[in-house]
Amino acid sequence: MKFTRRDALKGLGGIPLMGAVWWAGAANTVAKKRERSAILEQLNIQPSLPTAVPAIGGKPIRVGIIGFGIRGEQLCRALGFATNEWKDDMRLAAEENPKHSALKDFEAQDKLNVQLAGICDIFDYRANRALSSFNTEDNKMERFRTHQEMIRSGKIDAVVIATPDHWHAPMSIDALENNIHVYVEKPMTHTVEETYRLREAARNSKATLQVGHQHRQTLSFQTAKDIIQKGTLGHISLIQTNTNRNDDNGAWMYDIHPEASPETIDWELFLGPAPKVPFNKNHFFRWRKWWAYGSGLSGDLLSHDYDRLNCVLEMGIPDSVMTSGGIYTHRDGRNVPDVLNVNMEYPNFSTGSSQKSGKEKGMTFVYSATLGNGFSRPTHLMGHDGTMELGNRLTIWPDSRSTRYADMVEEGKMSPGVPIYQYDPSASSPDAVASATSQYFADKGLMWTYINGARVDSTFLHMREWLSSARNGGKLSCGIKEGFEEAIASHMAGLSYKLGRRIEWDNETETLKSIEGIDFDEALLASI
């Protein structure tokens, strides 16, 4: 499937009128049709087109994979490489459920001009699993024991880093200092201090850095950005976004592999800069449950929600953050919270106003998370003139007290309880989602987007953009500026939870405002 801009224009030409864009007013009379046309004309909303990127020409880009766990395998599929075991599983799933299209989608994906040239994983089983599927006559792949060996081998042009959080920055910095292109999973860093060091390394490197916030490729988010810039919602004073999970996988209780042992896992390499503790399978497979290796809800899931709103609003780092929460649903030895509430304050932020100048300014971003209930609470952006619900599709309702729509509400052409606009690019594409956690990511627009009505892996688009930039140059959707904002905002939330107090940002000096007697990184990594 080729996604040229011309093709996208042709395809999208049919989508808005055939179901992707919908106005809820009944258009069964000539008068109603005229009202509908008048409202749509006034809103002037056009679904965004996929970003066109130059082709990845020349010799294949030699990519090294660092970390071949759950996310590492997903990233390899986005690059066009699936393990034999995964393909067998998906083939069986499709036989049992004809709507299960994961294998079909993978096989329809565009081929990227890459060679998976190296694998680096400290668990022998995972490294061998990659080699058994990817080391072929057409794709020669080598195992490297350490990321340093891989980066300095001369056999790799770019690395994909999908390790525990405490290795993200050290590996990224090392690669960038050796001019190796980097795709790193979120959160970009594990501490405040290394966030600055990584920014410096990225600024000084000839190589590119892309942070793995693939939702920046989701067309509903790009469309939402256009809607807000046109003043459709008026001034947005409140955002509410949530994490709702209630299953073992969603609570990071991943399976422990039967082949795991001190003989098959290089435990010292796993620990790296983390505190020295004896070999522990629970820590190795479920590392997200401990601050020593992961970042809890603030770094793992808030970072998603923060960045998907930051890509729409470009709100940047908050002036202050207050966080509360606790371990209330999974008392299993973890030291990161499983319930978290975060308030980020932007007292000077504005999205424009339909009222008199200067009346409205300021916004609160509210993130609420639980790993003990899966009831879907959507993301809402609440403005003076309207409210937007945002996920893989978006819906807008007018506000009963809107200034912009006051006449239409009074004349009965708009009703506060009836949407005035809905964008649903998946309307003609029934999907099968394999698990509750997958459904969580899909609803948020974090797994795929739709082009010409076809479902497309947003991670594939994100990596394609990164590789194209590495080969041709060009701006990235989530480079060091966006990664820096995501990391600092996430760390502010984690610090506020740890310290039980407000964490403030000085925008002029680009530093956290100090608190007497507190070392922020010591606090962030503390076990309680």
Image (cartoon, rainbow, N blue to C red):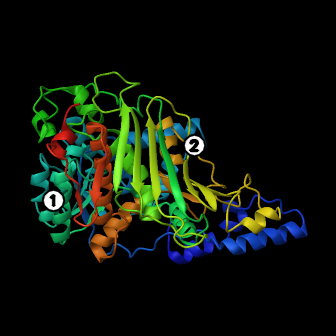
User: Where does residue 162 sit, x and y in percent of width and height?
Assistant: 27, 48
Tell me the element at label 1: helix
Quick one: label 1 or label 2, which is nearer the N terminus? 1
Q: Is residue 127 visible?
A: yes
**Left or right for 120, reference 323:** left
Q: Amino acid at mark 2?
A: Ala
- Point out the image quarter for the C terminus: top left
Residue 197 numbered mark, or none: 1
Residue occupied by mark 2: 432
Location of residue 292 with respect to 167 vertically, above or below: above
**Structural crowding at the residue carrying mark 1, measured as other residues with C-alpha within 10 Å and reported as few (<14), some (14–19) or many (≥20):** some
Q: Secondary structure at mark 2?
A: loop
Residue 436: x and y in percent read 50, 35
Q: Is residue 415 left or right of residue 309?
A: right
Where is residue 160 shown, x and y percent of the image? Answer: 26, 55
Please say whether residue 113 is visible from this viewpoint: no
Task: Give the residue at x 53% y 60%.
Answer: 236
Q: What x and y, as percent, mark residue 158?
A: 22, 62
Q: Label 1 is placed on what type of residue?
A: Arg
Camera-near label (1 vs 2) is 1
Mark 2 crowdedness (10 Å alpha carbons): few <14, some 14-19, many ≥20: some
